[in-house]
Each structure stands twice: as structure tokens, then as C-alpha cells.
């Protein structure tokens, strides 16, 4: 069942099995607010099991850097805005992965990682990425990193 993320009244709908459900819900709401403010796009997620194609696309891109996560995916979303395809997966451990994939040749393409407030840095990231910190009223402290996508997907 689809869930339109409300960034004014943050809810843990779809994320309740996460040990950092409140922080992950805040992170998801933070993303929803960004896309509403920038594109007037309503950020809607579905359970990962309802959209295996989006999850597979994200996992295919992550495999470019040998990043296969053992975490339980809870929710995904995919949409297009301003010539860019975006896709997200929110994992039970508090990790959010987003893809920004410009549809025009030579446009920006990257994978972003955001860690919910209160979660440890996963072992898969320890020697590969440095994380910047960002304060959010909705999500507390968000730690994030990214890599540029080299292949075509």
C-alpha cells in the first residue's frame, strides 16, 4: 500500500520494525520536504516487496561498487523530476540509499547514502566513505556520503 509521506506530521508508517524508526521516519520526511519545496512533488513510498523492479535497479547500480547490503529493505520509491530519475530505498537498520540519475547524456548521476540519527556506520562503509553531517529539524543529525555512477543503467 502506498504511503504519501507527510513532512509536517512525521509518521513511522511502514518503518515500525526499524530499531531507529523515529529517526528513519524523520529522514524520510526530510527527503519529502526537499522534493516538495524543489519540485512540488509528493513523495510517496511503497513497501519494497510491492516494487521489486525499483529495488533491483538500485541494487544493480550499487553492485558497480560491490555494495550488496544484507539489510532488510522496508520501502522504496521512484519518480522523475526535471529530467532526472530518482529512486530511494529505506532499510530497516536506518540506512537510506538514493539514486539521482540524469536522463540526458553527460548529466549528473550519483548514489547517495544517508544514515539515520542513532545508527552506527555500517561495516560496508568504514574504509570506503567519509560522512558529512547535516542537522535537520525532522531527522536530527543526518550523516551522508555519495559516489558518482560510472555506468549506464
Image: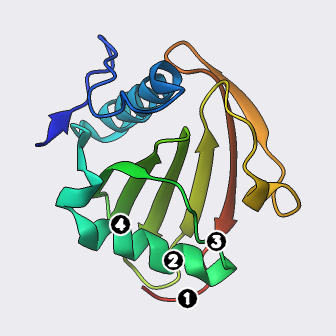
Please name whichever residue, 61 or 66, is drawn nearer the observer in this view of the structure. 66
Q: CA distance from mark 1 to mark 2?
A: 8 Å
Name which of mark 2 and mark 3 comes first in the sequence: 2
Image position, residue 124 (x, y; %): 74, 61
Q: CA distance from mark 4 to mark 3?
A: 14 Å
Q: Which residue is mark 4?
A: 55
| Numbered tag placed on residue 51 in the rendering | none
Name which of mark 1 and mark 2 comes first in the sequence: 2
Secondary structure, mark 2, is helix
Q: Is residue 87 left or right of residue 40?
A: right
Image position, residue 153 (x, y; %): 42, 85
| Numbered tag placed on residue 67 in the rendering | 3
Secondary structure, mark 1, is loop
Residue 69, can we see it? Answer: yes
The residue at 69%/28% (across/down) is 134
Name which of mark 4 and mark 3 comes first in the sequence: 4
Name which of mark 3 and mark 1 comes first in the sequence: 3
Quarter-of-image position of residue 110: bottom right
Q: Which residue is mark 2?
A: 61
Evaluate if marks 1 and 4 touch, with contact meaning CB atoms under 8 Å apart.
Answer: no
Viewer-side label of 3, 1? 3
Quarter-of-image position of residue 36: top left
Secondary structure, mark 3, is loop
Amino acid at each position: 500500500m502506498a504511503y504519501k509521506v507527510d513532512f509536517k506530521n512525521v509518521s513511522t508508517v511502514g518503518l515500525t520494525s526499524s530499531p531507529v524508526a523515529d529517526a528513519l521516519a524523520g529522514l524520510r520526511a526530510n527527503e519529502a520536504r526537499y522534493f516538495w519545496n524543489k519540485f512540488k512533488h509528493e513523495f510517496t513510498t511503497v513497501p519494497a516487496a510491492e516494487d521489486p523492479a525499483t529495488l533491483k535497479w538500485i541494487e544493480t547500480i550499487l553492485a558497480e561498487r560491490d555494495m550488496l547490503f544484507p539489510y532488510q529493505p522496508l520501502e522504496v520509491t521512484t519518480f522523475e523530476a526535471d529530467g532526472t530519475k530518482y529512486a530511494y530505498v529505506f532499510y530497516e537498520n536506518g540506512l537510506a540509499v538514493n539514486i539521482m540519475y540524469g536522463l540526458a547524456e553527460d548529466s549528473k548521476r550519483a548514489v547517495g547514502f544517508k544514515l539515520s540519527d542513532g545508527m552506527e556506520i555500517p561495516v560496508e562503509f568504514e574504509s570506503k566513505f567519509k560522512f558529512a553531517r547535516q542537522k535537520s529539524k525532522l531527522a536530527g543529525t543526518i550523516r551522508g556520503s555519495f559516489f558518482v555512477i560510472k555506468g549506464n543503467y
